[in-house]
Amino acid sequence: MKFYYETMPRYIDFDKMGILHNSKYAVLFEEGRLAMSASAGYSAEEMEKHHIYMVISEAKYCYKKPIRYNEKVTVELWVVYIKTYSIKIAFRITKDNGATLCAEGYSLHASFNAQTESLCEIPERIVSMWAKYKDGEPINC
C-alpha cells in the first residue's frame, strides 16, 4: 500500500524564477514520511521517547519537472524493504493530480539508539507500522 500526502509549498520555498528550490524536495519528502508515520500510529515524538531515531544514511533525488509557485503537489511514499537495521523508503512528487512527475527518489534509514549511541535492530513496533506501506516497487532514479 502506498501513502499519499498533499501540500502546497510556501512562497519562501521558491527561487527568483518562481521554481521550487531543489533543497525543498527533501523537506517535502520528510513531511510525507512524518505524515505516513503518524497515520500508522507511531509519531516521530513517540519513537524519540523510546530513544530510537531512524537516521538517514543515504538519499537520492532525481528531478524531472519544476514545481512552480501556487501548484499543489502530492508526495507518494512507500516502503521498498525493511531489514534488521534499515528501511528503504521511496517517493514520487507529482502535480496536476498525478499527471506530472516532478521528482522521485529514496532514502535509506538506519535504526539508531540515542542512549547507546549505536545502531540497533528496528523495534518490532516500528517494523509492523511500516510494513503496511511495503510495496517493493523499485524507484527509477
Image: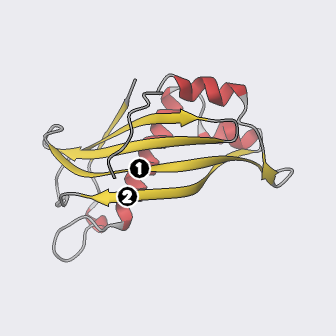
Q: Is residue 47 above or below residue 57?
A: above
Give how far across and how far down residue 36 sits, in percent. 47, 34
- Residue lying at the far right of the rendered structure: 116
Q: Is residue 1 above or below residue 88?
A: above
Q: Residues within 10 Å of mark 2 (few under 14, many from 20)?
A: some
Q: Is residue 136 above or below residue 138?
A: above
Left or right of 95, for residue 108: right
Residues at discs 2 and 1 in contact (Cβ within 8 Å): yes
Residue at numbered disc 2: 61
Q: Earlier in the sequence, mark 2 or mark 1?
A: 1
- Residue lying at the far bottom of the rendered structure: 16
Q: Residues within 10 Å of mark 1 (few under 14, many from 20)?
A: many
Give how far across and how far down residue 135 sits, in percent. 42, 28
Q: Quadrant of the N terminus?
A: top left
Disc 1 is placed on an element classified as helix
Residue at numbered disc 1: 29
Q: Residue at x 68, y 38 (%)?
A: 47
Please give the count of numbered marks on the rendered protein.
Answer: 2
- Foreground residue, 139 or 27? 139
- Foreground residue, 89 or 26? 89
Q: Residue at x 28, y 55 (%)?
A: 9
